[in-house]
Image (cartoon, rainbow, N blue to C red):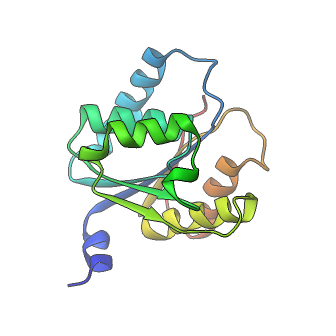
Amino acid sequence: MTTYDTELIMRTVAITGTRNTGHRSPDEYARLFTDYLGPFANGARFYIGGAKGIDSLSLLWLAGNTTADITIVVPGTVDQQPAEARQAVARMRGRIRKIVELRASELKSPAYHARNRWMVDHAGMTIGFPHGGEPSSGTWQTLNYTADQGKPRLIVPV
């Protein structure tokens, strides 16, 4: 059995969301994650983008409140991520099962879109936390890509 076969057997969830999270308190995000990530956490693997905002907040919540497998996926390397994201990964390193560094040559929109597609392609569903209805945001592009792949998506506006 390959790693890919194992991923298909497990419940796999990609998480996508806004980097702009200052408009809510940490307690509000904890409640949202309890309500919308918690029901999927037992026996699951989560793919998280390794950026600041929802990525870092969901990593900290999942690592601290569940036994779910956590895989961090970054477009380049972890060292190229913003300080907030690097700190979250370092703090929870013992709970992160795997880090996937896609090693893009340039960290521009195409690299982030490729990272998001990679997560969706490896997941059975996506949970998205968009801020606003901006259809050109990376969060909405990821959610739309999920739908295009015929996979379920759960949208939790923040």
Furthest toward the bottom, the residue is 1
Percent x, y of residue 52: 56, 38
Percent x, y of residue 96: 30, 50
Closer to the camera in the image, 153 or 94:
94
Q: Quadrant of the C terminus?
A: top right
- In this rendering, the count of numbered labels is 0
| Left or right of residue 2, residue 61 in this image | right
Could you tell me which residue is drawn at 75 percent across and 38 percent down?
A: 133
The answer to whether 58 is drawn above or below residue 98 in the figure is: above
The image quarter in which residue 104 lies: bottom right
Asked whether the viewer can see residue 37, the reply is no
The answer to whether 70 is drawn above or below residue 4 in the figure is: above
Asked whether the viewer can see residue 103, the reply is yes
| Left or right of residue 23, residue 42 in this image | left
The image quarter in which residue 90 lies: top left
Percent x, y of residue 85: 50, 40
| Left or right of residue 122, residue 134 in this image | right
Closer to the camera in the image, 32 or 26:
26
Could you tell me which residue is drawn at 24 percent across and 45 percent down?
A: 94
The image quarter in which residue 21 lies: top right
| Left or right of residue 113, residue 153 in this image | left
The answer to whether 58 is drawn above or below residue 144 in the figure is: above
